[in-house]
Image: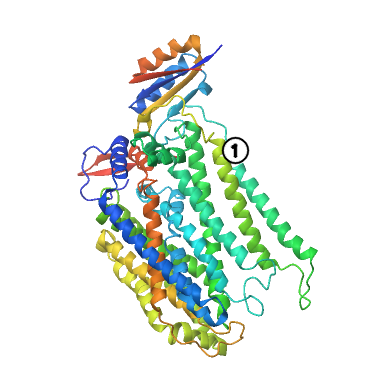
Amino acid sequence: MANTKLMGLFQDPEQAAGAMTKLKEDGFPVEDLDVYSGSPFPEGSFGEHEPEMRLFMFPLVGALVGFAIGLLWTAGTQISYPLVTGGKPLLSIPPMTIIMYENTMLGAIIFTVLGVLFESRLPRRNLGLYDDRITEGYIGVIVDCPEERASAAESALQSAGAEEIKKEEG
Amino acid sequence: MHNGEHELTAGPLPTHQDVARDVLGRFQDLGHRYWGWVTVLAFLFILGIVGFIIRLTEGFDDENRANWGYFVATLAFIVTTFTAMPVISAGLRLTKANWRRPLTRVTENMAITGLLVVLMLIPALIALPTIDGRFSIWFEFPLGAPGVWDVIGYGTLALIGLALLWGVALPDLAAARDHLPASSRQRVIGWLSLGWVGGVRQWRVLYQGSLLAGAMYLLTYPLVQTLMISDFHHGLIPGLKDAIIPATVVVNGLQGAVGMTLLTMYLMRRLGNYEKYFSVEQFWALSKPLLAFSLLWFYFWWASFITFWYGRQPGESEVIRLLVLDEYRGALMISFFLNFIGPLVALVWNPVRRSVWGPALVGTGVVIGALVNQVRLYVSAFSVADPSQHVLHPRPATQWPDAPDLLIMVGAISGCVLLFMLVSKIIPVVSIWEIGEGLRLVKVRRYMNRYVRVIAKSH
């Protein structure tokens, strides 16, 4: 069965929060609801589903990879081509530290950028169900539901005070 | 509770929609004044390139190294002021300062100057003498030091800055995509917005990502300043052994960043009519860290000076004479006044701190002082004939700028402002979404015989 997506547009965030409550009361799973807004709201303001994210893993992994490359690069080259100068230790730790730190930060930022893109599902070519007024402060409540429940979702959005309801056939 | 302004009333605050329409209206119609400034800055930047080409024709050999002193001082000035500005945004976002909202974008847009810094770094590195036989943090490390690692360090900072700038600007790029009339500019902005729609997941990722990138900028900036001062100053002056100089230049960079932010906000108020975004609250709030950094400026300078003063080894005496007592005494006095005495005397007065003109004036002085101080540090170091000596002898004479030096200094600084203005054509200079979020967290309430602002904590 094909799914339908609906978006109720609200100017008042309180009404949008009310719509989310009504939709959940009507049996729409919270995972199938989303809220589009022009600025962030504190977590849980709309009673929305908190998505699972692992963004913090990306810089951690990137930093480890960068550090390992820095260590292998500096230690590996000095060990492969040993040039003992004045009886000093072969590995020159101070410059190695700088290089490993640089590589750590470089790895961390590259992986963070990738993580941000992956976790926020960007870039996307098609905006899908969307309205320009969202970036002016309107709130869009998105419902992803089976086609036969579309009218129930529409009436829930309507009763909560949606200014406009848009629909996208899946 | 917070009462930032005397004239607080119970009148309605602007809405997200008001802010979006106002900012995008200014963004859409940049006006003749904008293009006039772009033309002037582009002309000055070209003059800087002419100065640079003159320097190139003179070559990079050891006899001509002193010619590159002002070029390197200008590079250090940009790192100390323009490129340091995203540190302000990162720090204020981490500490969740509500008053930051109108000014974060201005500081983040300056991250674009990291590109100019990386370009300028390459000839500066070529002008450096070999690390063989002289003191340096690279300990004669053979693997591409210092050139490759300096470029990677500076490149990393530039990359983090651009990632921070682009990531945090995505919602406003989407706003511009949605509301600007169709044009090639709108299409570029639409492409850069990456299809942002503002869902719950996207906002959570943006929030965490901006904190991470900001923290990384904060962690990388000290590295870059350490490389700058070690390779282009400390390693070129025989007898100079200053263990705290990396911390000194980081503090100087923070002071320069605050000073440049105040100056930029003041100019945007006067030339761009952004009075309602950059109000007394922002100037007042920034004047407090500026005062603290000015005190730290003296503390770090004094801690270095007193070590040399009591050490009195022959090498140390010569270094003090070069940098403090003789050849660059004038530069130090100017910097001492503009970076310490002036801010201290002015900013201890509450009426001065609590104004637009006061912090802006002090900030301007701090920026000028920072430029003079970089000349003292780097021109002196580049004029040393033989950095491989153990004791500085003879001391180089004071080196004054000639025409190519002046062209390079004016051109590079103009180039930074030009880059900022060009970025501001793509990314609005005021963050719509951050102000919109802030407006929702503020309510004006009656408190006894007056009105006060009540600010909610969002997390």
What is the x, y in percent for residue B232? 54, 73
Mark 1 chain = A
Q: Quadrant of residue A102?
A: bottom right
**How are the residues colored?**
rainbow
Foreground residue among A30 and B236: B236
What is the x, y in percent for residue A40? 42, 36
Other residues around mark 1 within 10 Å, as few (<14) / some (14–19) / many (≥20): few
| Relative vertical location of residue B136 with respect to residue A27 in this rendering, above or below | below
Image side of residue B33 versus residue B381, left or right: left
Foreground residue among B150 and B45: B45
| Relative vertical location of residue B101 with respect to residue B262 in this rendering, above or below | above
Q: Quadrant of residue B84?
A: bottom left
Asked whether residue B41 appears in the rendered view, the answer is yes
- Residue drawn at x 49%, y 35% is B202
Q: Which amino acid does label 1 sit on?
A: Arg
- Residue drawn at x 46%, y 52% is B90
What is the x, y in percent for residue B111? 45, 55
| Relative vertical location of residue A135 with respect to residue B146 in this rendering, above or below | above
The residue singled out by tag 1 in the image is A54
